[in-house]
Amino acid sequence: MQNIKIEKVTLNIGVGNEPDKLEKAMVLLEKITNSKPQKTFTKKRIPTWNIRPGLAIGCKVTLRAKKAELMLKKLLYTVNNSLKVSQFDDKGNFSFGIKEYIDIPDVKYEVSLGIIGLEVAVTLQRPGFRIKKRTVKQSNIPSKHQISKQQAIDFIKKEFNINVEENK
C-alpha cells in the first residue's frame, strides 16, 4: 500500500484573451499527446486584463496510466532530467514548465503555430487514495498514508533517474 505511482500528467497552455492563440494551443496539445484537449474557462472577473467569467483562456490535456508515464519521460528529457526542490509541493506533486515545444523529442516545428510554451503538472498517488473521491462513505486520507515532499523526490529519482537540485 506504500507504493507510489503516477495518477495523471496534465499539460496546460494558458493564452489569455486571444481566440486565435487558443486554437493554435489546442492544435499543439493534440499534436504532442494524440489526445483531444479541453478548453479552460475563467471563473473570476479581472477588468485590467479584459477577462470576464466564462471566457476561454487556455486548454489542457490529462494523461493517465502508461500514456502518462511515456509522455513524462519525454517531457523530463526536455528539462535535461533535472528538477528543483521548489517544484514539488507538500502533497508530493510537482510541476515544471517547457519554454518551447520544439524541445520535446519527436515534435517538429510548425510555422503556423509559432513558438509556444506549456506547463506540466504531475499528480502522484498511492493505492487507497480513492477513498477521498468516492461518493459513498467518502473519507480523508490519513496523514501517514499521504505522500510527503521527500518521498516524491525519492520516487522521481528512483523511477525516472532525475537529478533534483537544491534551490539557489
Image: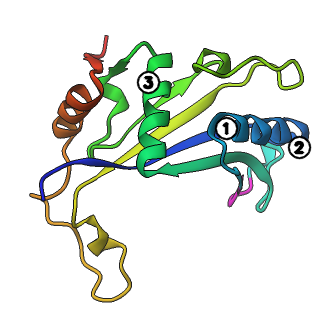
Name the colouring of the figure. Answer: rainbow
Find disc 1 in the rendering and name its residue. 13
| Contact flag, marks 1 and 3 (Cβ < 8 Å) | no
Residue at left offset 27%, top offset 19%: 164
Name which quarter of the figure residue 162 lies in.
top left
Find disc 3 in the rendering and name its residue. 76
Residue 95, percent from left and from top: 43, 35
> Which amino acid is tagged 3?
Leu
Assess whether residue 147 is covered by the magenta stretch. Answer: no
Circle 3 residues within 10 Å: few <14, some 14–19, many ≥20: some
Residue 127, percent from left and from top: 22, 61
In the image, the segment drawn in magenta is 40-45
Residue 111, percent from left and from top: 87, 18
Q: CA distance from mark 2 to mark 3?
A: 29 Å
Residue 73, percent from left and from top: 43, 28
Quarter of the image where the C terminus is located = top left
From the viewer's perspective, is 23 left or right of 36?
right
Name which quarter of the figure residue 117 lies in.
top right
Residue at left offset 33%, top offset 27%: 86
> Which amino acid is tagged 2?
Pro
